[in-house]
Every structure is written in C-alpha cells, then in structure tokens.
Amino acid sequence: MLVYPLELERDGKGWFVCFPDIPEALTSGRTKAHAMEMAQDALETAMEFYFEDHRPVPLPSKVRAGQAFVELPASLSAKVLLLNEMLAQQVTPAELARRLETTPQSVQRIIDLDHVTKIDTIAEAFRVLGRRLDFQVKRLPALG
C-alpha cells in the first residue's frame, strides 16, 4: 500500500495538514485526531484529481522517523499504480480494454476510484501491460 507522509501543524483554531507529495491534499481539524481523519479523506479525494486529469500520481516519499502519515487502502493503491503504468506506457483505456478482451466500460470501472474492483482484475490489467502486481508485508513506520 502507498504510505504518504504528511505535515501536521498547529494553527490558531486547530491543526493544519498538508502532503508534501500531493499538494492538492490540504485539510484541517479542530483536534489532532480530527485533522488525521480529515487527512485520510483529503488524500483520497486528491487522487480523484489525478484520475480525472489523466495525470500520473506522485508516489510517496519516505516517511521520516516520527513523521505522521496516511496509508491509502490497498485497492486505491493498486489503482494509482495502474493509472501510473498506463500513463507511462501511453496505453489508453480503450487500448487496455482491447488487450483485456473486454469492453471500454469495464476498463472505466477498473480505473474508477469509487468502483470496487477485484484485485485479480487489477492484476490481470497489469499482466497485459507486461507488469506483475506484487505484494509485500512491511513494518509500518513508527508514529510520532
């Protein structure tokens, strides 16, 4: 899963959150806990901008010791990586549909962030792009 570091700063009315890697994701909260909840939503919402604009999503930088972070859900992380690979290879949704031997509408659902897609379907999309979706188990960064 993609783990994005964030900057959490106290402001006059609560806590302000920004993501160095995703400048569109800005939010705040009354309490630190509320700001962290809002950060998850802000990061996931910002991903929609990249998908709508057909722009590569910046991958997260390394989380420093003690730095706060937000982890994207596995399904969203896989879709971000798929979008980035499609853009890197200049493969359109129509071309991906042809390679998958499916309809363009099916591919639109695969890259729709609001649509639940089976991980096997995403893995198959990577396969026809000449890539393999891989998993690892990692220790989470320590919270500050």
Image: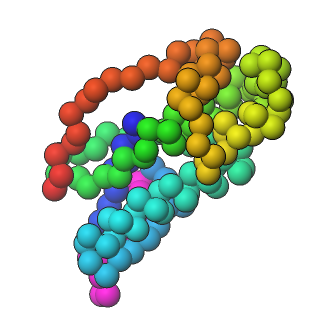
Assign the N terminus to one quadrant of the image: top left
Looking at the rendering, the stretch of residues picked out in magenta corresponds to 10-20
- Magenta stretch: includes residue 15: yes
Residue situated in front as seen by the camera: 78 or 55? 78
Furthest residue toward bottom: 13
Picture layout, residue 60 above or below residue 91: below
Q: Tell me where residue 32 sits by quadrant.
A: bottom left
- Magenta stretch: includes residue 89: no
Give the residue drawn at x 62%, y 19%. 124
Q: Tell me where residue 6 sits by quadrant.
A: bottom left
Give the residue drawn at x 45%, y 49%. 21
Assign the C terminus to one quadrant of the image: bottom left
Picture layout, residue 112 above or below residue 98: below
* Residue 95 falls left or right of residue 3: right
Q: Residue 130 appears at what percent x and percent y?
A: 63, 12
Picture layout, residue 13 above or below residue 126: below
**In the rendered image, is residue 20 in sight?**
yes
Give the residue drawn at x 18%, y 52%. 143
